[in-house]
Amino acid sequence: MDRSKKIIVSTDASGARDAAREGMLVMIVDVIDMSTTLESALDAGAYAVLGCSPDHTTAPVEVAPEQVGREACRLARECGGGIILVAEPRIGTDEERLARCQKVVRAIEKEKGVIEAVVPNIGAETPKLLEMKNRVVVAVTDTGGVAYDAAFQINPRVITGTIARTYKQKGMEPALTAVRRALSMIQESDRGIALIAASRNSLEDILAAQFIANLLIQEKG
């Protein structure tokens, strides 16, 4: 990576928004569980993963789940697969989860996309619930999803990363995967990479974001 590129760590949806405004590649780190769930989906062969806000959020940022829904449909058409929604509450019914996702659901339906299932946001175990290969997986969650959405509205160059055990990775593997993803995605036009801990109240997110940032700094030399 070009040594002139910045590597920063920030928190919350507002930090994600601000990093996107600065023209940075944004990585959302929500260890329990959004980014771990999406990493596990990629382990299981998902074509692409996205995040978005539920219908209601108290975060002081602008979000637009509909825009993420349209992107999910574009990607689904590209791969010829369906869309899987990951939502909350973790313990509850599909109807309860869908009730919090109506904005993205309506956008997908308007674009003639196919929602194959809605599943709980439970990290490494999520791919055991259904087939995810060649699907587009959208995490509609209160912290990681909102942070992803806030950045995506400004600059769609948003990715995810985790340090937790995933569906197929353990030990250092998830963190190294996050580093490789960031290095492979960064472009000349990006001012740097922003590691965004999804919540400042989540110590695991903050420590994970710092850990991945340190690995990136080592790579940068």
Image (cartoon, grey):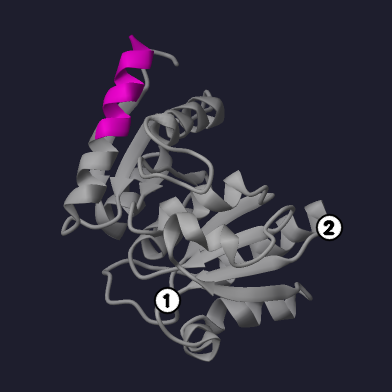
Query: Residue 219 at x, y = what percent?
Result: 38, 15
Residue 213 part of the magenta-drawn span: yes
Query: Residue 9 at x, y = what percent?
Result: 25, 38
Based on the displayed image, in which of its 4 quarters is residue 68 positioned? bottom right
Query: Residue 19 at x, y = what percent?
Result: 34, 44
Image quadrant occupied by the C terminus: top left
Q: Is residue 43 above or below residue 83?
A: above
Q: Is 61 situated left or right of 155 in this image?
A: left
Residue type at mark 2? Gly
Q: Is 75 situated left or right of 10 in this image?
A: right
Who comes first in sequence, dot 2 or dot 1?
2
Q: Residue at x 74, y 53 (%)?
A: 134
Query: In front: 159, or 110?
Result: 159
Image quadrant occupied by the N terminus: top left
Q: Residue at x 43, y 52 (%)?
A: 35
Which residue carries the number 1 mark? 88
Q: Residue at x 47, y 89 (%)?
A: 96
Q: Is residue 108 above or below residue 68?
A: below
Neighbourhood count class around disc 1 (C-alpha, 10 Å): few under 14, some 14–19, many 20 upward:
many
Q: Kindly state the secondary structure of the residue where label 2 is placed.
A: loop
Q: Is residue 118 above or below residue 178?
A: below
Neighbourhood count class around disc 2 (C-alpha, 10 Å): few under 14, some 14–19, many 20 upward:
few
Q: Kindly state the secondary structure of the residue where label 1 is placed.
A: loop
Q: Is residue 153 visible?
A: no
Query: In front: 206, or 45?
Result: 45
Which residue carries the number 2 mark? 80
Query: In front: 169, or 39?
Result: 169
Residue type at mark 1? Glu
Residue 91 part of the magenta-drawn span: no
Q: CA distance from mark 2 to mark 1?
A: 26 Å
Query: Residue 101 at x, y = what percent?
Result: 51, 80
Q: Which residues are magenta?
A: 211-221
